[in-house]
Image (spheres, grey):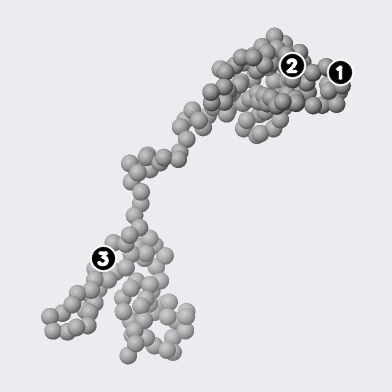
Amino acid sequence: MSCLVSSTCSLVPFDSTLTRSNRSSKLGSSLSWQSSFPKLSIGIGPVLSSPIVKKESFVQAAWTRRSRGEAAKRPNRKSWKQRTDMYMRPFLLNVFFSRKFIHAKVMHRPTSKVISVATTNARDIRTNIPSLVDNEACRLIGKLIAERSKEADVYAVSYEPRKGERIEGKLGIVIDTIKEHGIVFVP
């Protein structure tokens, strides 16, 4: 005689005449969280070599709810400052210097929308200035960024220097020019 293991893990004799719906009603189907734990305790009798099944015993499964201490120690969760910084300082200045041109843009951090862009690689600027990477080009880029940001009603931006980057030289010229034209830098 063969046996069928039910959803509650008690052994029930197998009846081939049962359909799927009859079998679930006879075996009992529970959708609670306790149904995920097997109700089975197996002991070996002194004389018999077959297992003896005791009903209504409770064996814990491997799944458990995370404790509050474990949830508090999540290593990949960002800090409060990291999560709220983009809303406290929403407009970010991004400046890129290459050997051939200078590119600057102001972005809205929460939505990643570009508010204003200025580059020396643009046609109207490229033809009017002698050098695309000198100090005059930096001043022109700063002036254009300030004007275009004001047109978009952005009067305060922030700048986060990259690791090891100093605000001096051409970058200092761009930032100072933006400040001179009425844009406030938020620390």
Indicate left or right for 166 with 176 as reference.
left
Residue 134's disc number: 2
Amino acid type, residue under disc 1 in the picture: Asn
The structure residue drawn at horizontal position 57% and vertical position 18%, both measured from the top left corner, is 166
Name which of mark 1 and mark 2 comes first in the sequence.
Answer: 1
At which x and y percent is residue 182?
A: 70, 11
Name which of mark 2 and mark 3 comes first in the sequence.
Answer: 3
Contact between labelled residues 3 and 2, with CB atoms less than 8 Å apart: no
Instruction: Establish if 105 lies above or below 71.
Output: above
Q: Quadrant of residue 149?
A: top right
At which x and y percent is residue 61?
A: 32, 62
Q: Can residue 52 be seen in this view?
A: yes
CA distance separating discs 2 and 3 = 78 Å
In front of the other: 64 or 182:
182
Instruction: Name the residue furthest top.
Output: 180
CA distance separating discs 1 and 2 = 14 Å
The structure residue drawn at horizontal position 46% and vertical position 32%, both measured from the top left corner, is 79
CA distance separating discs 3 and 1 = 83 Å
Q: Which of marks 3 and 1 is in front?
A: 1
Tag 3 residue: 58
Residue 128's disc number: 1
At which x and y percent is residue 53?
A: 24, 77
For label 3, the SS is loop
Contact between labelled residues 2 and 1, with CB atoms less than 8 Å apart: no
Name which of mark 3 and mark 1 comes first in the sequence.
Answer: 3
Instruction: Establish if 20 lies above or below 106.
Output: below
Q: Nearer the viewer, mark 1 or mark 2?
A: 2
